[in-house]
Amino acid sequence: MSTSFVTPKEKLQYCTAIGHEELNKLITVSKPTTCLLDPVPTKLLKELLPVAEEPLLNIINSSLSLGHIPKPFKLAVIKPLIKKPQLDPSELANYRPISNLPF
């Protein structure tokens, strides 16, 4: 396993390991949209799930048990989204920031 974990000032608390069933459910009900930061497009992840499930489960549970989130998973793409379609798009106050994290 890679040692590219960043040691946070505070560790995750109250997180428990997940099982195959929960991981399967989370991935299969995910929308097919993909964030620019996603290392694998959602559609491809769903197709590869039978092969990728065990390694992915190990990565997730290691992260939860160690209390560390890999640094690349903490980066977000922030996109402005207009609050209501009828608002003036030239006014910055009419937008709210939406953060898209990987996965």
Image (spheres, rainbow, N blue to C red):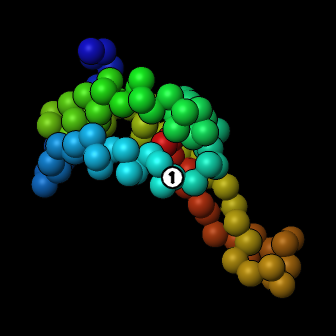
Tag 1's secondary structure? Answer: loop
**Could you tell me which residue is drawn at 25 percent across and 28 percent down?**
58
Q: Is residue 24 left or right of residue 12?
A: right
Answer yes or no: is residue 10 visible. no
**Could you tell me which residue is drawn at 69 percent across and 61 percent down?**
80
**Could you tell me which residue is drawn at 86 percent across and 71 percent down?**
90
Residue 49 vertical position relative to residue 98 in the rendered view, above or below: above
Answer yes or no: is residue 71 visible. yes
Residue 71 coordinates in the image, percent (x, y): 39, 32
Residue 63 coordinates in the image, percent (x, y): 24, 34
**Along the viewing direction, whichever of 82 and 35 lies nearer the viewer:** 35
Q: Quadrant of residue 99?
A: bottom right
Residue 38 coordinates in the image, percent (x, y): 56, 36
**Could you tell me which residue is drawn at 83 percent across and 84 percent down?**
86
Q: Quadrant of the N terminus?
A: top left
Residue named by callout 1: 30
Residue reaching furthest to the bottom: 86
Q: Is residue 21 left or right of residue 35?
A: left
Q: Residues within 10 Å of mark 1 (few under 14, many from 20)?
A: few
Residue 20 vertical position relative to residue 56 in the rendered view, above or below: below
Residue 7 coordinates in the image, percent (x, y): 23, 31
**Along the viewing direction, whichever of 38 and 94 lies nearer the viewer:** 38
Residue reaching furthest to the front: 50
Q: How many marks?
A: 1
Question: The residue under label 1 is which amino acid type?
Answer: Ser
Q: Quadrant of residue 40?
A: top right
Q: Is residue 52 left or right of residue 16?
A: right
